[in-house]
Structures are given as C-alpha cells and as structure tokens.
Image (spheres, rainbow, N blue to C red):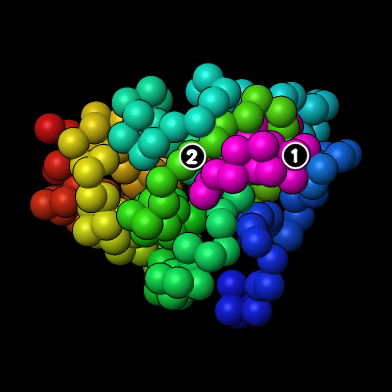
Amino acid sequence: VALRNARGKYVYLLDGDDCLVQNALSMISDALSNNDSDLLISSFIKKKSLGEFKREHGIAPGIYSNLSFFESIRFFPTSSQIVYRMEIIRKNNLRFDENITAGEVYSFTIKFLRFSNLIQVVSEPSFYYVMRDSSAVHSVNFYSDFTVLKALESIYKNGGDVLGKISFHITAFKLVTSFTYTKYVKNSVYDENAVNVVKEILGNKIFRQCLV
C-alpha cells in the first residue's frame, strides 16, 4: 500500500519502532543530489538497554555498480537502512511479497537491483535501530520463519549477474540461518518443530547453493 501511494523521488523504509537520527533526511538528500544514485545505504545506531552503539556496515563510502558492490563486501547489509529510487519501483511495478514475512526486505532489494545501476554508500548513520525481543530475528514463529525459504527462492531467481559473487551466497546463508537455526539456538529451542524447520532448510536445493 505504501509503495503504491508514494509520490516522492525516493522512498526510505523504516520499522515502526525505529526513528531517524537528527538531520537524517538532509544528509540523505545531500548525498543523493550529489550523485543521483538509484539506491543509498547508510549506517545506523543500535539502541540497547545499556546505551547506543553506532554500527558500521563495513563498506567503504563511494559509488558502486551492482557487480563492484558485491565484489567489495563480505555480505549485504539486510536491515532497513536503504533508500530506493521510486522511478525504478514504479516502472517495474516492484512490490513486497505478502507471503514472505522473514527476509522480505532483502528479497525486495534484490528484485530492485535487477533494474538499478548505481549504489551509493555513506558512512553517516541515518536511523536508530531498536533491539526488540519480539522482532522476527529474535522471537520464534515457525510459520513465519519458514517463509524465509520463499525469500531465498526469490533471491536466487532475481540474482542476475551478482549470482556469481561469493558475497551473494554468504548473505543468503546468513539470512536463512538468522531466522531459523541461529535464532533457535539463542533461544534454546530444540523441539520437534525447530528440528523439522532445520531439516527442511538443509534439504532445500537452493539453500545448498549457499554452501558451495
């Protein structure tokens, strides 16, 4: 609904309990006006109970093509810290898959990258990321968790030229395990449902491509 009604030149996705840092919009506007990029990635400040911690994305600031970007990273930053050009979204009718509730942002981003040319990276943080126990990467919901395999299918279907980059496969691996195995271990969940989800993942042909 939001993407259908967006009227600006760019759109920025933000979780309901996260908030922008001071002057975030002016920083984003200045960065994009100087380079007219299709997609912008910023860093963010993680808010925990013990204080605030700036989290770097580990990527050198600059302008990248899709291929040079994936060649320069260990893995893609999959949290909501990305600004997208609306013209590309409108022209290609890009939407979030409503059947995916785990990994939906990265799945959408990969679809977007099929039609983009320039990725811009800035080191400045744009928002406060609130760590919630109820978030999808912390709370266990087997039905929702299992949809990460649909995200995985979409990611590999739309990967295009970046399918040949090791960082693409590492990101896919991290995405799937963060919503399943890693989360279950952190929460000490070892019941039959958790075992069945992990078995399905390990037996998934697309997931095995992450391990090659």
Visible residue check, residue 173: no
Three-letter residue code for mark 1: Asp
**In which image quadrant can residue 67 be found?**
top left
Q: Which callout, 1 or 2, points at the residue further toward the start of the chain?
A: 1
Residue 83's label in the rendered image is none
Residue 75 falls left or right of residue 22: left
Residue 84 falls left or right of residue 101: right
Alpha carbon of mark 1 to alpha carbon of mark 2: how far? Answer: 15 Å
Q: Which residues are magenta?
A: 27-46
Which residue is tagged 2? 119
Point out residue 78 in the picture as x, y percentages from the top left corner: 49, 43
Point out residue 160 in the picture as x, y percentages from the top left corner: 23, 50
Visible residue check, residue 9: yes
Q: Residue at x 41, y 46 (%)?
A: 117
Point out residue 41 in the picture as x, y percentages from the top left corner: 57, 38
Q: Residue at x 86, y 40 (%)?
A: 23
| On screen, residue 42 above or below 146 | above
Residue 30's label in the rendered image is 1
| On screen, residue 165 above or below 40 | above
Disc 2 element? strand
Quadrant of the frame with the N terminus: bottom right
